[in-house]
Amino acid sequence: MPKLKSLDELRELRSRLKHEIKARTETATTITVGMGTCGIAAGAREVMQAFLDELSARQIDAHVVTTGCIGMCSKEPLVDIQQGNEPRITYGNVSPAMVPRIIEEHLIGGKVVQEWAVGRLVKEA
Amino acid sequence: MADLHRADVLVSCRHGRTPELVTALRDEIERRGLAEEIRVVETGCSGFCSVGPVITVRPEGHFYASVQPADVPELVEETLVKGRFVQRLAYKEAAGRKAITRYEDLPFYAKQMRIVLRNCGMIDPRSIDEYIAVGGYEALGKVLTSMTPDEVIAEIKKSGLRGRGGAGFHAGRKWEATRRAKGDIKYVIANGDEGDPGAFMDRALMEGDPHAIIEGMIIASYAVGSHQGYIYVRDEYPLAVENLTLAIQAAREYGLLGEDILGSGHSFDIRIVRGAGAFVCGESSALMQSLEGKVGEPRAKHVHATDRGLFDRPSCLNNVETLANVPQIILNGADWFASIGTERSKGTKAFCLVGKVRNPGLIEVPMGMTLKQIVNDIGGGPPKFRKVKAVQTGGPSGGCIPASMLDIPVDYESLTEAGSMMGSGGMIVLDDRTCMVDISRYFLEFLKEESCGKCAPCREGIKRMLEILVAMTNGTAKAGDLERLETLAKTVQTASLCGLGKSAPNPVLSTIRYFREEYEQHIKDGYCASGACRELTAYVIVDEKCKGCGLCIKVCPQEGISGEQKQPHYIDQAVCIKCGACYDVCRLDAIKIVPKAAVSLGGNGGNGHGTPAATPAKDKPGAAKGKA
Amino acid sequence: MAKITITIDGKPIQTEEGQTILEVCRKNNIYIPTLCYHPVLEPYGACRLCTVEVTRHGWPSLHTACTHPAWDGLVVRTNTAEVRAVRKTLMELFLSRTPNVPLIQEMAAEYGVTEPSYPVEDPNEKCILCGLCVRVCNDMVKAHVLNFSSRGVDRKVGPPFMEKTRECIGCGACTIVCPTGAIEIVLQKNAIYAAKPLGPTAAIYVPSLQAVPRVPVIDTDSCIRFRQRDRSNGEIEDACGACQMLCEANAIDFTQQDEILELNVGAIVVATGFQMWDSTKLSQYSYGKSPNIITALEFERLSNAAGPTGGQILTADGVKPERVAIIHCVGSRDKNPNAHEYCSRICCMYSLKQAHLVRDKTHAEVYEFYMDMRAFGKGYEEFYERVQEEGVVMVRGRGAEVQVLPSGKLRVTGEDANLGKLVAVDVDMVVLSSAIEPPADAQKIAQLFGLSRTPDGWFAEAHPKLKPVETNTDGVFLAGAAQGPKDVPDTVAHAGAAASMAVALLNRGEVTISPQVAVVDEKFCSACKTCLNICPYAAISFIVEDNVARVNEALCKGCGTCVATCPAGAITGKHFTDDQIMAQIEGLFRVPELVEA
Amino acid sequence: MPGNGKLKLGLYWAASCGGCEIAVVELREKLLIVDQVADIVFWPCATDFKYKDVEAYPDGYMDVCLFNGAIRTSENEHLAHLLRKKSKVLVAFGSCAYEGCIPGLANLFDRESIFRRVYLESESADNPNKVVPQTAYHMPEGEIEIPKFYNTVKTLGQVTDVDYFLPGCPPQDPQIWAVIEAIVSGNLPPKGSVVGANEKTVCDECKHVREEKKIKKFYRYHEIIADSTRCLFDQGIICAGPATRGGCGALCTKVDIPCRGCYGPPPNVVDQGASLLAAVASVVDADTEEEARRIVSEIPDPIGTFYRFSLPASLLHRARR
Amino acid sequence: MSNNGKFEPRIVAFLCNWCTYTAADTAGVSRMKQPPNVDIIRVMCTGRIDPVFVLKAFAEGADGVIISGCHPPGDCHYTNGNYKTFRRMPLVEMLLQQYGIEPGRFHWGWISGAEAPKWAELTREFTEQVRKLGPLNWKKQFASKED
């Protein structure tokens, strides 16, 4: 690791490093992947992996969390996206291919991909 | 680390079985092929000793307590794979029986304000990257690039930061004195000796967040104009030495230590020096003697270390906790720091809350919080059936504050007024089973061993005080011993050369001040109400109260208790070793502590009609029989 | 040095900066008790006895005076109740630690502490761990032998691992500074005091009260600075130096060397005095076999007020003798080859004086064994009478033998001529009035100044009656006992004469040289240079211009050696010429035949 | 023949080696001058004069008689007396006449031991009948007489009074010539004095540089190679120069040979041997008697070394008989 | 020179003024017993004694010669006059021996001013010694014309 010559180099390093411990830092968006046994069977793991790769490629800080089976087995694999205190949007039958678009439009664009959304959960006050 | 981990499992406790737990976790994750996504991080101690080893899963925030290696498969399966919380491993608040799942909701941490211990339990102490990731060395960068040394000193003075070692000397004023002292070679010294029995916050800090101390030292060196620093670590802290060494090497590699730090032209390097197990070396001038390779003996006090300290050169010595505060003050500004704490004691203080309290552990609270809040809200109050008798702060140099005064705020002035002192931060909760005379004897025993022996009042005085106290605890004390003890303590306090000698009498004087009658009881009646002084104590069973439930028989290590079911039981005095196990376990208050003299050997001692002085009633919520 | 004012016990004192409170008090003789302080050693602050109340900017607090600097404006009170209380407790602690040390008992009594108030662990413990010995051994003597070991209550003083070490040079500095006498010096060969029991007690001492000049001298054999410098061949340069530190006139200069002065003088007065005859040479007096058999000179040292016993006459085990015997003519008036035949002249009178001293100081019985009482001087006889009246038993007979009895008593046997039978008496002390003899190096001195010696070894005066102070060599005079035994009055007279003769010689202006000088007849001298290095006075020198040798008449003493040496007969003496001597020889044999009987 | 105004010169050769006769001849052409001023009236070695001629001369007939050679036999003594009578000026010519010279060393022995050594014990002697010379012997032809062989060799001065002494073995021709000139011119120093030699010693004429004499060891001439610039005596070789009258021009030391003392003692010295001995011994570098004795004992034959030319003239004349 | 038939040797003694001459003087003053055979010639120092005096003495008819002065190495009044003596006299002894004079006739040594008895003793002893050797009478050898 070459010596840091200035404060800017330190700050540049910090921004890179911050990314790596993002799991422990506060972020606004949380992506929850249903990982019940049925979810896994339906390919939730691949979807999560796609999400992870996409997020790291685009240097986006977002938590990827797994959860148990919510019950809509038909729509597995299910992925919820919660941004700040926006309503929690759940996408159904998510496949790795769909991940880029979801991230593109929803996470970055801030617009829900209506055709794939299967549910909306508004947080009580 | 190229790829991105989805979740981090923080094992943040130095419990004995932690290494075993970490390997089990890593193996299981490996086996489940989750190594890419899940990372196991060994962090420093997070302070929650009573329920160690503890695990926190990020980002979910799940908090598991007392995790055994055997629980690992279930944990990995449920939480890491399926994302479900394992109820079994949740922390259960004793009183409310309600499991608390998230780290943030734990009452233990709720009331705390963790500035110095901020990273402890959060980051991997051996990785400089993680320290930088959470904002490490930003303060140093700010200081080196945008502040002059005088500005740094002014900031520290404005913050009101005072020495965390115990004396509470204003850090800013010390830095200023060192800066103004003549001499081109100056030293910055971090005191990590922490000799007090029962104190381990410096250890947790050095093991958990070494870089915070290093950053603090570099800022101090820039402020006072020093190019060489020493960290004096207690010999009994090998892991602290290891983590500090790794941190220093990493800092050097990153150009944050050594020549021309961050291109600022300021150069500073740090060497670690291990102590040799002498408590006296915690005192600044003795520490410097030890650094110079000499016998740890304090020097004359009128020579200020800031003028002529180590190797007779200006030296700025601060406790490691004081230095760890510096980066935060620089980052968040003096006003932020000054807003915390009381009018004259600013910022927070780390305490080792130990003794008779439900949740002992390492805590950091803002100055001014009352003892009661600390003991009850954070510590969870005394264990069942027990009542807080007093709180001992400041270790062997501190004193005891009786239960009646627990409302006093924790800051330098009020503790000193109460006859104790802030000290390094030891806070021992004592209950009715603790004998104040015995506590004083314990501390003096320690101090007699640790006195450097140089000056007569401390060497000879402590030994003689101890003799009197031992006489009190074994019933050979004579009338007037208490007054002799007091005058002797007064002389040791005034005439001794260094802090050790001057503060050694505090435990004795403060216990006499608040618990004089206990001393008189020991001398006149030869009776130790708490039963701690075994030579004075006898345990007898009160026939009327004893329902013959047999609980005491089970716990007696000597099998000295006999009696039929439902019949009043009987303690054989010849065999009884006065351990008090029966007394603790008996729900019916049927066992009484009586002066040994009142019990003739053999027989039940006249069915327990002890001498007056009511035995302390146990704080029992009714006689409900609880299942074991 | 900047001036400061410090008020001690209400009295404002003006003094220099850079001193400690204790130093200022000591200078103004304000009493502050100390145990671990010594003026030449770095203050250590171990005993805390010198605690005083110091008020600065209105804040009174207790500090140790020995370490605390005297700053300007300080208000010091040395005897407040609180200070006394601290000292009282400290003395209780010390007394309980070392109950049987007189100094501690004394100081404790000052504060009303008479009994140890805590259980005594070791009644004969003497060490109070004040560290004076450690500091003197390390900082001053630089032998680095003593130091503290272990910590806290187990702290003790001693050499490394408490074992004997060769590093200890036996200087005894630790025994001197130790306040409680916890360190004794076990006299071994390298201990300096072993060699000089009656010698000076310190390395720097005033030789005697009558010394001229009366200034202290340093005995480099026992002075630590020189011993350490030699022992470490220069490595340890500046050990000790305590005397230099304390000398206010800083008159001590360690670099002074013994110098050999070469003086061209006009006159020399040889006053080399005498030495005591070695009393072991006559075994019957068993000198050396008991410490209580001493010579008169040793008795003089004993009774000298500046002596080791301060003038008290004590036997070796420190008690006054009950019976003392004085034996005259030990080694004098004795044909034994180991002794001297002549009378040492001065012993009778000093023996009487010593008898009087013994009677006067110890009221002991005194037995004086003498052959003849030679009280020849003015008032001497009267003194002899007075001494007899004081009850000194006069035994007219030389003490024949002194035996050391198993009990340590000394049995003196001798013949009492008046009673006509042998007598013996057991005494506690025997004083031998030993003979005096020329000093050991008399022969070297004689050769140096061309002096000859009379049969008894004293230097020969030119003429016993007419020239008692002159010698055969012009310009060399004799003064005092060098010429023969003399007592003080005679010596003073004799020395006065010598001095005046010397001065007379110096003031004479020109000196008449002896006529007997040699002269070179330059007609016959052919520069063979045989004579050049013959002359002991280098009176003959070779004149290169004239190519002849020439005699310097002022230097020539007229011995004639060159006359006999010159092969060409070119050098003749003005007297004792060859012709004169040849004529004498011829004259001897021209005497007509002895007249037939 | 007399009466022609020329000096009448007589020379006689007593007990000597004859070197002095040759020395006269050394005058070479100056002999002619001599011949002009003087007539030889008696020179048995070179001319045929007989004793009876001399006895016939009137007393004081000869102006000068150069008598060389010591008195060994009665004949020598007889001639000495005769020539004394017959000559106005009798000159002891050469070391033998003046102080005894080499023949004088015989004084270490007496007649009897000499004859025994020469005629009986000598390795080459063939004298079965042990015949030694007798002063008188009966021959049929008549009585033969030979001069009596004295026990002690005497100098001329010891048998008769001598007017002048001309030292040297042999005297050097310039010195001889100087004497003759003096005689011819008549200005002679007072009777009895030594002529043809200097007042100072040989050292005065010697070129060797003299420094300090401190001798640790004596060397005989052949034992070391002497430094030719420094004085031989300084180097431990015994040189009689300092105790010998100068005048010979330091001939011997010029070729690094130590002087033997043939010109006799300097004016103030009575006994040349003793004076040389005193000088030699005094400069021995020894501070104890033993050391001194060890150094001086290396000198063999003290008389031969110190009295080589002057034994008969020495105080003791001869070794004890 | 014989009185009542016994041979009385004539002995010449050369004494140094400071030591042996003083001793001889003291011996005389103390009336010590000494033979009359010794005639004393005083010189300032034995260093002054020229070997020629010894030869002269014998030549004039002495039967024995004594030389005595201060003890070397340091008694000499002139520091090292006696050194020259002990350098010369061994050579004189060798010379006299060659001359045929018995060593017994020539004695040289040291007697300090304090040793008067030693001088008296020397005179008695030496006189007897020379008496045993008989007369030297050096001149007798040249008495007869003939030889």
Image (cartoon, rainbow, N blue to C red):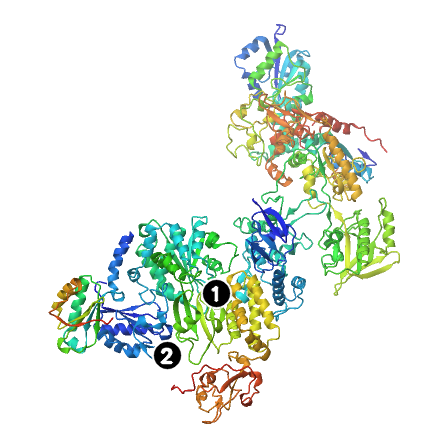
The answer to whether mark 2 and mark 1 are in CB contact below 8 A is no
- Going from N to C along the chain, the mark reached first, 2 or 1, is 2
| Residue C547 drawn above or below residue D296 | above
Identify the residue position indicated by label 2 in the image.
B95
Residue C576 coordinates in the image, percent (x, y): 72, 27
Task: Give whichever of D176, B552 is nearer the camera.
Answer: B552
Residue at the image point whose x is 61% and y is 45% from the top: C252
Residue at the image point whose x is 62% and y is 67% from the top: C96
The residue carrying pointer 2 sits among few (fewer than 14), some (14 to 19) or many (20 or more) residues within 10 Å by Cα, namely: few
Residue D234 coordinates in the image, percent (x, y): 56, 31
| Residue B480 drawn above or below residue C266 | below
Residue C509 coordinates in the image, percent (x, y): 72, 26
At numbered mark 1, what does the secondary structure look like: helix, strand or loop? helix
Identify the residue position indicated by label 1 in the image.
B414
| Quarter of the image that includes the N terminus of chain C | top right
Residue B369 coordinates in the image, percent (x, y): 42, 67
Residue C327 visible from this viewpoint = yes
Mark 2 residue type: Ala
Q: Is residue D271 left or right of residue B542?
A: right
